Amino acid sequence: MVAPPDTAPPDNDVLWARSLHYSHDGSPALVGVSVGVRQGEILALTGPRGSGKTTLLRCLSGQLRPEGEVWFNSVPVHTMGATARERLRRDRFGWIGPEPQLLPELKVWENAALPLLLAGASHRAAKSAACEWLDRLDIGGFARKRPTSLTRAECQRVALARALVNEPAVIFADEPTAPLHRAERALLLRALTTAARSHEVTVLLATHDEATAAVADRRLALLDGRLAGAAAASSPAHDTPEGQAACSLSA
């Protein structure tokens, strides 16, 4: 996956990075990390807490500017200014973390529609798209409620709807199941992977949980900011019937 120096990114890699270095207050967080991710692939980034998973996601998504190269669809993200990177994140990327980070003053559908509203979509179009994803995630009945009336697991599904509403090319999922119980964790993972398979969305999934990593097509392990190894999933989910199903938790 890693190309030699002075070559362009592989055509089949939607996201590609070479020799990333990043430090937090002088402490190395990433040391020479290179990675390539294909369209529609679910890649698990594994490793203990503090291994560099979140930093790598933030570098790849343009939130941080590391030393090295980051390319999205053969466009150099590392040369973009702050405004262009913000637009890229808003229009082409989705993000879900361990906390839903919903705005309590907004209704559930407004939280889910926020990326579209910020991008200038009409109120009607944004609401329609948000409610469609809320329905697919079996929380459409909460569309007019406030987030404070939802459970933690339901709020995470709203956050997933928000990550999907702008039809992103890539979703960055940073420990999205960490705060959930086992049954709720499985439900969210099923929603995420089904949406990714049915819409050919690339997913980078950071996790320290073995069961969560098992849904991925491939894994990259990080340790102390360095790439520790790679392993392909034994049975890629692309071949499963669920991979061909429409995204609905009740399907």
Image (cartoon, grey):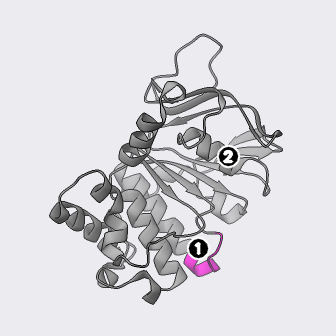
Q: Residue 159: which disc?
A: none
Whether residue 184 is situated above or below residue 74 in the rendered picture: below
Q: Earlier in the sequence, mark 1 or mark 2?
A: 2
The quarter of the displayed image where residue 32 is located: top right
Q: Which residues are magenta?
A: 178-184
Amino acid identity at mark 1: Arg
Residue at 36% in and 79% down: 139
Whether residue 37 is situated above or below residue 1 in the rendered picture: below
The residue sitting at the top extreme is 6
Work out whether residue 231 can be spotted: yes
The quarter of the displayed image where residue 138 is located: bottom left
Q: CA distance from mark 1 to mark 2?
A: 23 Å
Q: Residues within 10 Å of mark 1 (few under 14, many from 20)?
A: some
Amino acid identity at mark 2: Thr
| Residue behind mark 1 | 185
| Residue behind mark 2 | 55
In terms of secondary structure, where does tag 2 sit?
A: helix
